[in-house]
């Protein structure tokens, strides 16, 4: 425990930025679970005023996901940071009416319900546009708002499989494997925040109006498989699983050290290969016809991976690191979170920050990415309890009386 406490305080206390680039942008996060909330937290980190709507009884599904410590949902603390939290049942007529009030003077609405849900509740884009034609509506769904699959339930794991990503993970003779984390949702969240910024640019700097952004999870992940479609179209080659080996680079694999640790590398350029050969004291390999250039090495990948792996197996991880750094080899140890907390680069870059929190006292989360020199973002607070900002927003900003707020709460609307 003492070691952990020391690691905890190796990271700085968060410092609030007063010059965030999205200050003044107002966002309604009407989404649930991972993709939409991740899109909005990226905006919130850089100053957007994000109002997070949750169902008054069930809350956001993210609150129910592990890790949960003493009843406190830790993932929620991160994905809902910098957001003001209110409760509202959008499926009730009174809730829909309050939503219509809430979206006035907002810039962006983000939702990730199944297509048609907002329309069923009477708050579809036609209604939203009638209230304010400048509002941007980002709609994230598993398969998009159109097409024969539009009504299918979809989430990250499904998108990863349909996009083809899952089929690229695992050993060639083994089953396809999922990443073990909702990567598809997070990829969609990145595309979501990017698309919002492009729509804001079009509206505010080019004199345009609001619009609907239709973002499908599987299409977001599919876009990450950059060369796969053109490779199949032109060569009729289907990209297959190659385990830890990169299909188009050699040597490349996952290598185990003498002390049971793992490192990975890929000699993606000729200069990397030349430095690697010197590092393992096998300079003669660079003139061998079998390893002369990358196409030759790929053809003989099993042999060259075996040569590199045999050298690494005779050395501890620290010895390999020292040697590879000396020869400027591109590689990395395979980190777990304990490694990240103890790594000097993480500390030097302040990749994580300590944030005060009423439930946890203080907790460490990832710092804001990327870093801006003039208008940095910051982590001001972690995810709040359900309804923390109900009175602040409904009474303070919508002008609702406290009596009316109580009535709505008793009725299960708020």
Image: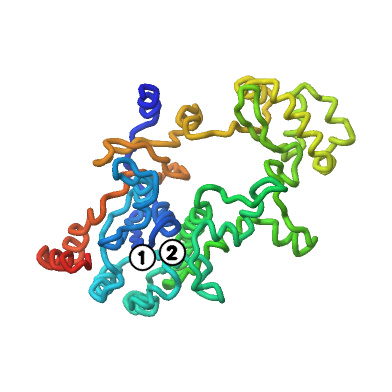
Secondary element at tag 2: helix
**Image position of 167 (left or right of 14):** right
First in sequence: mark 2 or mark 1?
A: 1
Residue under numbered circle 1: 107
**Residue under the image location 53 percent in, 75 percent down:** 146
Disc number for residue 200: 2
Q: For the N terminus, give its image quadrant.
A: top left
Q: Which mark is residue 8?
A: none
Give the residue furthest to the right.
289
Above or below — where is 58 with respect to 96?
A: above
Residue at 26 percent across and 76 percent down: it is: 93
Front-most of 409 and 126? 409
Callout 1: SS:
loop
| 34 left or right of 166 in image | left
Tell me if I can see residue 46 in this picture: no
Residue ID at (52%, 65%): 216
**Which residue corresponds to the image point at 85% horizontal and 25% vertical from the top-left?**
284
Q: Nearer the viewer, residue 296 or 50?
A: 296
Please indicate, yes or no, whether residue 68 appears anywhere in the rendered image: yes
User: Total number of numbered labels?
Assistant: 2
Task: Name the image quarter holding residue 139.
Answer: bottom left
Indicate the position of residue 19 as horizontal and vertical percent values. 35, 47
């Amino acid at each position: 425990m003492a070691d952990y406490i020391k690691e905890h305080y190796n990271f700085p206390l968060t410092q609030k930025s007063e010059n965030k680039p999205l200050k003044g942008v107002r966002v309604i996060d009407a989404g649930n679970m991972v993709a939409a909330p991740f899109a909005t937290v990226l905006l919130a980190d850089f100053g957007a005023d994000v109002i997070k709507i949750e169902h008054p009884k069930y809350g956001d599904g993210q609150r129910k996901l592990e890790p949960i410590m003493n009843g406190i949902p830790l993932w929620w603390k991160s994905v809902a940071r910098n957001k003001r939290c209110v409760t509202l049942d959008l499926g009730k007529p009174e809730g829909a009416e309050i939503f219509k009030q809430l979206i006035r003077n907002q810039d962006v609405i983000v939702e990730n319900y199944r297509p048609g849900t907002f329309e069923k509740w009477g708050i579809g884009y036609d209604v939203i546009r009638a209230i304010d034609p400048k509002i941007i509506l980002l709609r994230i769904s598993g398969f998009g708002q159109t097409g024969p699959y539009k009504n299918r339930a979809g989430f990250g794991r499904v998108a990863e499989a349909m996009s083809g990503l899952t089929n690229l993970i695992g050993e060639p003779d083994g089953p396809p494997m999922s990443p073990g984390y909702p990567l598809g949702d997070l990829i969609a969240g990145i595309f979501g925040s990017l698309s919002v910024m492009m729509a804001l640019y079009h509206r505010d700097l080019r004199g345009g109006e609001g619009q609907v952004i239709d973002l499908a999870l599987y299409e977001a992940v599919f876009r990450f498989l950059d060369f796969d479609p053109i490779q199949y179209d032109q060569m009729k080659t289907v990209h297959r699983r190659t385990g830890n080996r990169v299909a188009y680079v050699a040597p490349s694999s996952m290598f185990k050290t003498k002390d049971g640790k793992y490192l990975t590398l890929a000699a993606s350029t000729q200069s990397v290969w030349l430095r690697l050969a010197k590092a393992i004291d096998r300079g003669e390999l660079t003139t061998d016809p079998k390893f002369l250039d990358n196409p030759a090495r790929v053809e003989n990948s099993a042999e060259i991976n075996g040569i590199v792996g045999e050298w690494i197996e005779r050395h501890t991880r620290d010895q390999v690191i020292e040697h590879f750094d000396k020869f400027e080899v591109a590689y990395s140890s395979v980190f777990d979170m304990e490694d990240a907390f103890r790594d000097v680069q993480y500390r030097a870059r302040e990749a994580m920050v300590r944030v005060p929190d009423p439930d946890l006292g203080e907790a460490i989360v990832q710092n804001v990415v990327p870093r801006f020199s003039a208008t940095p973002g910051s982590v001001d607070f972690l995810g709040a309890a359900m309804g923390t900002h109900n009175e602040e927003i409904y009474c303070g900003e919508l002008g609702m009386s406290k009596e009316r707020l109580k009535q709505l709460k008793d009725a299960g609307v708020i």
